[in-house]
Image: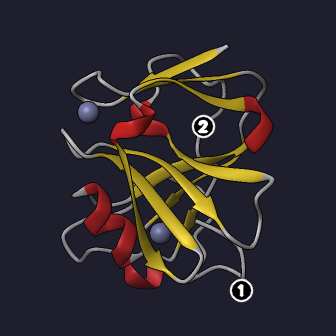
Amino acid sequence: MLRGSCLCRRVRYEIDGTLSGALNCHCSMCRKAHGAAFRSRARVRAGDFRWVQGEDLVTWYESSPGNHRGFCRVCGSPLLSRFDFDASAHGLPLGALDDDPGVKPGLHVFVADKAPWFDIADDLPQLAALPPRKAH
Ligand SMILES: [Zn+2]
Ligand SMILES: [Zn+2]
């Protein structure tokens, strides 16, 4: 089981099962949402994820149509993304995990939108964007 929590620890979640599709997203929305050069995220099956504390504090922001970013309204930590076009899976920001998920981001996406003040210094594949309808 994997556990995660927000900065103020009022919101906690648990995941049974494995994560997949870990990547670093450099799009401008992820950069702003995370206040960082990129967002590291993975895919989690909806049935594997559950809130265990503070779900009422999770506020959802629809950053693009059908893409709902959930964050703790007390401390602002990004916690989960829900997708109207695929209810079977969620997007999980890796930064809120308290346990080792056993996966690491395998590529960079939306590097065409990359911050000018950050240089990618690894050898992972870099995609300019993503195919349509792929959630990030
Ligand atoms: Zn919080
Ligand atoms: Zn993004």
Residue 18 position in % (x across, y down) = 76, 29
Crowding at label 2, few (<14), some or many (≥20) Cα neighbours within 10 Å?
some
Farthest front residue? 56
Look at the numbered disc 1 and give the secondary structure of its residue: loop
Q: Amino acid at mark 1?
A: Pro
Residue 38 position in % (x across, y down) = 37, 59
| Left or right: residue 96 compared with residue 25 | left
Q: Amino acid at mark 2?
A: Lys
Q: Which residue shows up at 37% across the image and 28% down it?
A: 11
- Colouring used for the render: secondary structure
Residue 121 versus residue 4 in the image, above or below: below
Q: Which residue shows up at 62% across the image and 47% down it?
A: 42
Q: Which residue shows up at 23% across the image and 46% down it?
A: 76
Which is more toward the observer, 34 or 46?
Answer: 46
Residue 17 versus residue 134 in the image, above or below: above
* Ligand 1's quadrant: top left
Crowding at label 1, few (<14), some or many (≥20) Cα neighbours within 10 Å?
few
Residue 24 position in % (x across, y down) = 50, 56
Residue 46 position in % (x across, y down) = 74, 43
Which is more toward the observer, 120 or 78?
Answer: 78
Q: Quadrant of the C terminus?
A: bottom right
Q: Which residue is mark 1?
A: 132
Mark identifier at residue 104: 2
